[in-house]
Amino acid sequence: MEKAIIIGSGPAGLTAAIYLARNGINPLVIAGSQYGGQLMLTTDVENFPGFENGIKGPELMRKMIKQAEHYGARFEYTNATSVNFLNTSPFKVTTENASYESAGIIVATGAKPRRLGLESEDKFFGRGVSVCATCDGVFFKDKTIAVIGGGDSAMEETNLLAKFASKVYVIHRRDTFRASIIMVDRSLANKNVEVIYNTEVKEILGSTTVTGLKIYNNKERTERELKVDGLFLAIGYIPATAIFEEQLEMDHKNYLVVKEETKSSIPGVFVAGDAADYRYRQAITAAGDGCKAALELQKYLESNL
Ligand code: NAP
């Protein structure tokens, strides 16, 4: 039986692994077949403390894995396919290859930004298409960009991007925003922001980087091209929590509910990072959660083993 299993290998899971391993609880990390989380898809990370010239997202994640391994964490690069946390001790985790039992669990499965589903979105991801203004906004200084979405995230991204870009188009598929009035007012108060309502992006144009969009007005049923240098998707997130359905308490958008101090609805199961956090979604906040979850799990083991 394991003392601790960590499901997920983004900054939350890996920080938890480093803390547990250094404290002598060599955790098993179910890292997923695509390890490292969202930072594996980003280029330069300039806001993670300690790297004065920035660091590539994948490099940062590989360093975290090496650090965790150095202190004794073990990794399985497969996906967890089911769990049993209910009325059972130890907890059970099944992967594509094996079944495990563990006294404690940290869930750090993260979330994925919702995508439009266009082929060109994949082609230009990291080359003009981004899902994080905090991470990538600075690369669009004095450029023209578009933000897609009509929720609070889109407004927040727009407000931030308006400080860098010369022009920000907000492209929303309806004529009313889902975002709160205060967020809309704040974003649209920027003079370089213009909203394009009732409009959907049909194609992202360019050769090596983004140069424009093919957009479709769904009221007028007309299509046109819009010149932009970048595109920020802010159309919501999908937490990677499907395997915890019927096991852990979730909110109406399937984010895991944290009771207090990273504790889930089941004692002994802790939650860190974007699987529970729709508000901040930063590598550093996820890492902070991972640290807290590891310390809480350690305390739990001390009084329950
Ligand atoms: P959201 O509220 O679900 O909004 C997503 C937006 O994207 C909606 O306007 C939706 O359009 C649009 N959308 C979804 N799929 C689309 C598609 N395929 N094509 C085009 N548009 C699409 O997501 P969110 O803005 O990320 O916010 C998530 C939660 O976090 C919310 O509860 C929000 O209040 C919260 N949040 C809070 C803050 C804050 O308080 N500072 C900041 C960010 C987020 P429709 O409106 O037509 O459905």
Image (cartoon, helix red, strand yellow):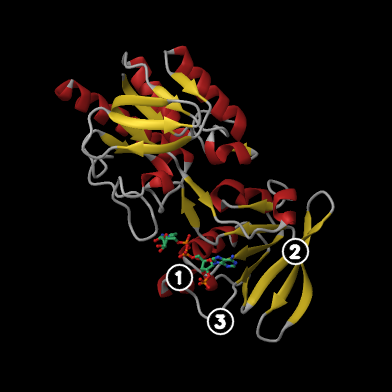
Camera-side mark, 1 or 2: 2
- Do the numbered discs 2 and 3 sit on residues whose CB atoms are within 8 Å? no
Q: Is residue 4 visible?
A: yes
Q: Is residue 258 left or right of residue 214?
A: left
- Residue 234 placement: quadrant: bottom right
Q: Count every numbered label the image shows and give the total.
A: 3
Q: Is the Cβ of the residue at disc 1 closer than 8 Å to that at disc 3?
A: no
Q: Secondary structure at mark 3?
A: loop
Label 1 to label 3, Cα distance in Å? 12 Å
| Amino acid on which disc 2 is placed | Glu
Q: Is mark 2 within 8 Å of ligand 1?
A: no
Task: Report which residue position mark 1 lands on.
Answer: 179
Amino acid type shown at disc 1: Ala
What amino acid does circle 3 point to? Answer: Asp
Label 2: few (<14), some or many (≥20) within 10 Å?
some
Task: Classify residue 271 as left or right of residue 180.
Answer: left
Quarter of the figure that contains the N terminus? top left
**Where does label 3 land, which residue?**
175
First-in-chain label (1 vs 2): 1
Q: Secondary structure at mark 2?
A: strand
The vertical placement of 239 against 85, above or below, is: below
- Crowding at label 1, few (<14), some or many (≥20) Cα neighbours within 10 Å? some
Ligand 1 lies under 8 Å from the Cβ of mark 1: yes
Q: x and y percent of residue 271 in the render?
A: 33, 39
Q: Quadrant of residue 157?
A: bottom right
Q: Residue at x 39, y 29 (%)?
A: 6
Could you tell me residue 211's position as x and y percent? Answer: 79, 59
Residue assigned mark 2: 203
Q: Residue at x 74, y 58 (%)?
A: 229
One can see residue 55 in this view: no
Q: Is residue 122 left or right of residue 267?
A: right
